[in-house]
Amino acid sequence: EISRKYPSLVTPSGWAFAIWGVIYVWEALSCAVLPDDGLRGFVAANAFQLVWALAFARDYVGLSFLLLCGITASLFLALAEQPADTSVLVAPLSLHAGWVTVASLLNLNLLLVKLRATTAAQVFAAFATIYLGLAAAVSYGALRNQL
């Protein structure tokens, strides 16, 4: 596993990845009741995610970081396409976007380990990951309530 190969200061426990089952089932159920329009961002996110899985499995950590950024941007586009109070896809997309935002930051930490960054750089990245993850969650919550 790539996470074991590049142990960073903020590697989550293995059980944390079980969230993917919840995300995919919830999104699939939501898509089953949605019309086909307004899903461009969602389709793009899934295309990025497919390529990300291949890149990450082949140890292309830098490319996988860029693809995670593409997934994140696509999911936020998908959220912008959904009516805030009427779409059944908002909640699972929000969970997916939040998790991928954190995954992007975690992947950056793996990249620093792979590139043999200094301990100081890795410590800075670990703290930045925690703070940026929290800031993103608070900002998204505040923005979503204003839309």
Image: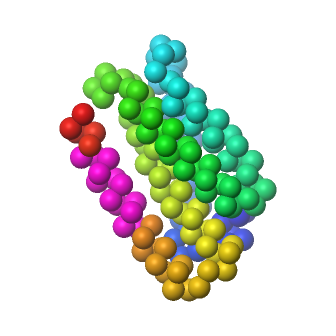
Residue 54 position in % (x across, y down): 75, 47
Residue 140 drawn above or below residue 132: above
Foreground: 94 or 69? 69
Chief secondary structure of the magenta portion: helix
Q: Which quadrant, please, contains the N terminus? A: bottom right
Please, which residue is most extreme toward the top here?
35
Residue 106 position in % (x across, y down): 54, 63
Q: In which quarter of the image is residue 136?
A: bottom left
Residue 125 drawn above or below residue 45: below
Foreground: 38 or 23? 38
Please, which residue is most extreme toward the bottom here?
119
Q: Which quadrant, please, contains the C terminus? A: top left
Question: Is 56 in the magenta?
Answer: no
Instruction: Tally the marks.
Output: 0
Residue 128 position in % (x across, y down): 42, 70
Residue 16 visible in the shown view:
no
Which residues, given as a range, are shown in magenta? 130-142
Residue 147 visible in the shown view:
yes
Residue at image position (51%, 61%) is 105
Residue 119 position in % (x across, y down): 56, 86
Foreground: 145 or 33? 145
Please, which residue is most extreme toward the left here?
146
Question: Is 134 in the magenta?
Answer: yes
| Image position of 135 (left or right of 3) | left
Q: In which quarter of the image is residue 134?
A: bottom left
Residue at image position (64%, 35%) is 47
Residue 135 drawn above or below residue 23: below
Residue 112 drawn above or below residue 40: below
| Image position of 12 (left or right of 80) | right
